[in-house]
Amino acid sequence: MNLSSPGGTITIAGKTVSRLGLGTMRLTGPGTWGTPSDHDAAVSLLRRAVFTQGITHLDTADAYGPHTVEELIHEALHPYPEHLLIATKVGFLRPAPDVWVPHGRAEYLRASVEGSLRRLGVDRLDLCYLHRIDPEVGLMDQLYTMAALQQEGKVKHIGLSKVSVEELRLASTVVDVAAVQNVLHMNDRYDPVVEVCRDRHIPFVPYRPLDAGTLAKSSLLDAALHWLLALGPHVAPIPGTSSTAHLDELVLGVSGFAVTAAAGTDRGSCPGPRGNHYPVPALLDRTDMVTNILYEPSSRGGTD
């Protein structure tokens, strides 16, 4: 069994976990809706990720299914290993497949947290993200609700998803932001929030790190994951998959990162932008990157 930490380790929400996490949005039906086509395979994948491959950071959301993946995680892994971090998210309504509606009213956020507690079988969520800012409610009011839930002991740490530098700054006046999730990958290569998180010692968790599969080809996967990890020790990508074979490829893809670091990559700093983009590793053939560059991730279902 391989129980080393893929990609090294990082502390998120008070737990030391693998820098390579696992996004779980793929463990549903089409349109991020309903149950997966192979329930047993989804359960096996979660168990393999944690107990065989050493991944100790799982990212999910009540909106995945909705509710499907939180229930799968409970079935596959409860009672949870003490070192496992399960991060979930609240703040989306799911009225239909492929339909995502931000909903940040206090009563909905509260009901969502209560539902996640019940489905995951825990008394407190270790890390709960505000999945999206609802513009009809406003960031501050949503954070006041999240802070109240934290004070009541239902949420231990609060994270933010898809936020700007200014939104992160405002949020930090209300809560201690435990982690930030934004899109970042080699086809969308600059987000100033990465550097702000580095400076504030906040973990940055890139979702859709392989551009919804565009960078998942064997010729690109290693380079794409190494590029993210090399941005700084505060970066912890969460690629998703529903295939155990692809899961193994992801873990193998980061296995050589420590060697790269020893050869001269500075893991302690986040490279600055070059023309509003972070540098691309020399080992990547740039001609491969343009393949399917206009591909819309939403056409495969979901937003994260």
Image (tube, grey):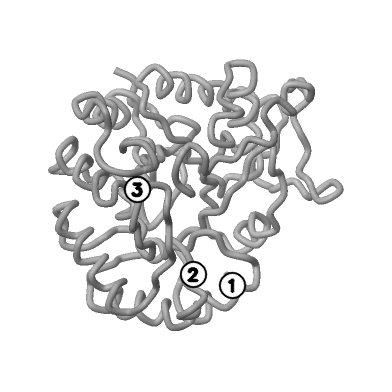
Residue type of the residue flagged with mark 1: Glu
At 61% from the left edge and 22% from the top edge, which residue is drawn? Answer: 259
Left or right of residue 199, residue 179 in this image: left
* Depicted 237 relative to depicted 137: above or below: above
Give the residue at mark 1.
167
- Element type where label 2 sits in the image: loop
Most foreground residue, 74 or 289: 289
Give the residue at mark 2.
133
At 66% from the left edge and 43% from the top edge, which residue is drawn? Answer: 231
Mark whose residue sits in front, 2 or 1: 2
Q: Residue 205: where, in percent of width, then height?
A: 51, 49
Q: Cβ–Cβ below 8 Å for labels 2 and 1?
A: yes
Mark 1 or mark 3, earlier in chain: 3
Left or right of residue 194, residue 282 in this image: right
Residue type of the residue flagged with mark 3: Thr
At 41% from the left edge and 77% from the top edge, which residue is drawn? Answer: 142
Q: Residue 132: where, in percent of width, then height?
A: 47, 64
Most foreground residue, 28 or 2: 28
Q: Residues within 10 Å of mark 1 (few under 14, many from 20)?
A: some
Most foreground residue, 214 or 195: 214
- Element type where label 3 sits in the image: loop
Left or right of residue 87, residue 294 in this image: right
Give the residue at mark 3.
60
Mark 3 to mark 2 CA distance (whole Å): 17 Å
Q: In which quarter of the image is residue 251?
A: top left
Residue type of the residue flagged with mark 2: Ile
